[in-house]
Image: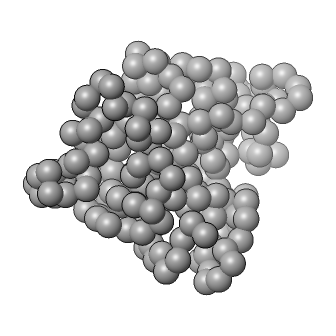
Amino acid sequence: MIFEGLSLKIEAKKSTALVGCSGSGKSTVINLIERFYDPLRGTVNLRIMRKHVALVSREPNLFEGTIKENIAYGASESVDESEVIGVQLSGGQKQGLAIARAILKNPVILPLDEATSALDSRSEKVVQEALDQVMLGRTSVVVAHRLTTIRNCDEIIVLDKGNVVEKGTHLSLMEKGLTGSYCSLVTLQQKPTNKKFLE
């Protein structure tokens, strides 16, 4: 059992980040939104079906076919050649393809599950800038182990063992100091030897 009594409200057209240590339930929330599996009890209130959701994950799936076909996969049938050619691939090829897919699909809901985790810092900066543009005006749920990538989210929800322990903006959570879970995670991540702890 990962969640028992978890209740989250994710605001429409806002960016919500999910953070916490490994095993806290971050990716499980994304999987529930995507309906990769259903909850045993309770409900996931997702009235808009998958055609309005575009997932960008740490290890996106590539399909048999050309790069063009991979980028256009899932987009509406009205995608023309110029739209596909104009998409800039950046950073790691898989993340670039997933971001390009998301741009063309023009989703209402955009789950981002550690979309930049496999990139070096230089590539991550380029990919993060692309994601920031894609997120504008969309309901975004962001899971990130590099906490610097979620500082500008409208709300940050801190999970621990499947429970919400804190929520707020980056500034409001940092104001709690080391007594707060989020501030403790930020401080922990700044220590090079502990970087993998949050992944």
Q: On the rendered image, what quadrant is the N terminus found in?
A: bottom right
Q: Is residue 14 visible?
A: no
Colouring method of the image = one colour
Q: Is residue 104 visible?
A: yes
Give the residue drawn at x 61%, y 83%.
42
Which of 148/107 is in front? 148
Image coordinates of residue 120 in percent, x first then y, are 46, 18
**70 above or below 11?**
above
**163 above or below 111?**
below
> Which residue occupies the extreme right position in the image?
64
Give the residue drawn at x 33%, y 40%.
147
Horizontally, residue 176 falls left or right of residue 60, namely left
Give the residue drawn at x 55%, y 45%.
113
Q: Quadrant of residue 12?
A: bottom left
**43 above or below 178?**
below
Number of labels in the image equals: 0
Image coordinates of residue 183 in percent, x first then y, are 20, 49
Image coordinates of residue 59 in percent, x first then y, are 65, 34
Image coordinates of residue 144 in percent, x first then y, are 44, 42
Q: Quadrant of residue 191?
A: top left
Give the residue drawn at x 44%, y 24%.
124
> Which residue occupies the extreme bottom position in the image?
42
